[in-house]
Amino acid sequence: MCGIVGYIGYKPAKPILLNGLLKLEYRGYDSAGISTLENDGISNIKSKGRVNSLNDIKEIDSLNGHVGIAHTRWATHGKPANCNSHPHMDNSKTFSVVHNGIIENYHELRNFLTKQGYNFLSETDSEVVPNLIHYYYKQLTCENDKKFLQAVKKACDDLVGSYALEIISSLHPDRIIVTRKDSPLVIGCGEKENYISSDIPAILSYTKNFYLLNDNEYVEIFDDSAKFYDRNLVPIEKDLKNIEWDASAAEKDGYEDYMLKEIHEQPKSIRETIGSRLTDSHTPVVFDDLSFSKEYLSNLQKIYIVACGTAMHAGLVGKALLENLCNIPTEVDIASEFRYRNPIINDKTLAIFITQSGETADTIAALKLARARGAKTLAISNVVGSSITREADHCIYTHAGPEIAVASTKAYTSQITLVSLLSIYFAETLESSNKGLIQELKKDILSLPDKVKTILDSSEDIKSFAEKVFQEKDMFFLGRGLDYSVSLEGSLKLKEISYVHSEAYASGELKHGPIALIENDVTVISIITNPLLVEKSISNIQEVITRGAKTMIITNQDIQGDNYDFCLRIPSINPLISPILSVIPLQLFAYYVSKAKGLDVDKPRNLAKSVTVE
Ligand code: AGP
């Protein structure tokens, strides 16, 4: 999705803005642009294509200003084109604006402004914003110093939808104004300089001190200070937050791609997720940041786990854990469905929201709905201070470190690790009699980092199989129970980065239709980790082999037969958390298929890292 960077200080803004945009490339985008304040007004340079294509525009060499805003655009309204790229300016070229989000009432505002004599040069929803600011600015009679902020506020009062906005004006060259509603924005603080970004990693190499903005707050940012205001422009105070992430953690560290680096980081990221929450199998799991009572948990009628994409797949494992350990009925919902399906919620409902970024629009909207209907809400996120963490009643972090590749890998394994710890914490609070299972799970959770390492050692074998089948058009992932949930994740990974059509099926469903698709040159990947379901799963595999499919099996069970193309043995673990291990070969497989096809693994077409619009 779109990315925002801004700078105000004593250094030339251009290199900082371009560097920040490059760091935001992973979010997915189709055009880029920057505006800086120069001696003769605002310079605005933008282009369809990559950030580096801005350097081909001659005028960029003359930008020396110390105040600027920049943007990478992921097209929603209007195709990728120079005219639709941001920043957008008003007709008089007094204001320049970058916008993330969607202005839902832009038709109405455009009609209104057209009647007032304004022209529009783009097809975007965003271009109404600078013109609306200009429209109000001309009418204001207040003190000059207050006019810019007043005009921005008046314009925002007219906007319906979501936005993070950064605005500069040639009439107020000492400041940048920013505001947000349902779209992320942070302010990084330096010595006599300030940075702005939609995403912490873009400016992490400049500062670790951040102000986190809430919805409908406004900020006037100067080189040496920032003034904060609430929705009515009443001044407010904000605390600086220190973000522990190391800037180098957001670099590739010698790996060819972020995704490969993040796959290999999993022993470490899982260890970080466990942290001090679990120290040994005989000691209870501790969550310093939670205080659920036995009474509250035993009165719960339902738990919802709500998320999107990979995070939702992690939620499927959470359901199995919570139901098995705590005996609480648990439903998993796709956030974009949950928010519109009128779910049954009351004060005996706990709603858990899983989101790596903490910025996914549907997940945040689903949380607001659950909270409004009386549920307690618990957010699981990887990004400290992200939007969802400020909306939820409770929040716990995966601590997996920055995940840059669009395809989520280490976040998934950390999410399941954290949900398994949470389920044990609930079960122990409930004084569950399942002590044997709980102790076994704790031992297995502590063994995860080493077991993940063992699987990573098989990378070359997985690569060889991927290179054999990478040209095939269709692939299927099969599994039963939680092996089915991990099949869904394997299939999503493959689609996302290799563009190979793939489907995941519960193995038992095969005969109910999908087997009609099996023929020569189809690859079937089967995950078999549940000892109770081995025989049945093997029968399903034999059925597809008979029909000509190439097969890969990922298993920790004793599998008979030798007619599989590739069988990868992975370490044994309790079936309730086996997806943490069985997903690793699937991540590597998707990665190597994508590489064999010569694709951009980290920035797959049409996709964005965090989906901040509906
Ligand atoms: C994962 O590979 C995807 N890129 C995507 O499904 C992602 O998991 C989903 O958009 C949810 O993101 P979130 O965890 O940041 O909310």
Image (cartoon, helix red, strand yellow):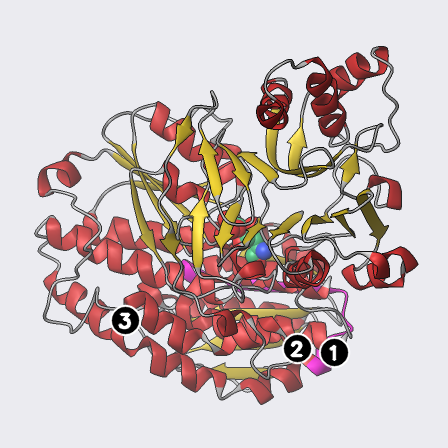
Q: CA distance from mark 3 to mark 2?
A: 28 Å
The answer to whether the residue labelled 2 contacts the one labelled 1, judged by CB atoms less than 8 Å apart, is yes
Name the kind of residue labelled 2 in the image.
Tyr
Q: Quadrant of residue 436?
A: bottom left
Q: In the visual, does 229 lie left or right of 174?
A: left
Mark 2 surroundings within 10 Å by alpha-carbon count, few (fewer than 14), some (14 through 19), many (20 or more): many
Q: Is residue 199 above or below residue 229?
A: below
Residue at image mark 2: 592
- Magenta residues (range): 467-483
Q: Where's residue 61, x and y in %?
A: 85, 61
Q: CA distance from mark 2 to mark 1?
A: 6 Å
Give whichever of 204, 579 is nearer the camera: 204
Residue at image mark 3: 445
Q: Earlier in the sequence, mark 3 or mark 2?
A: 3
Specify whether residue 614 is in view. no
Residue at 66% over, 66% down: 602
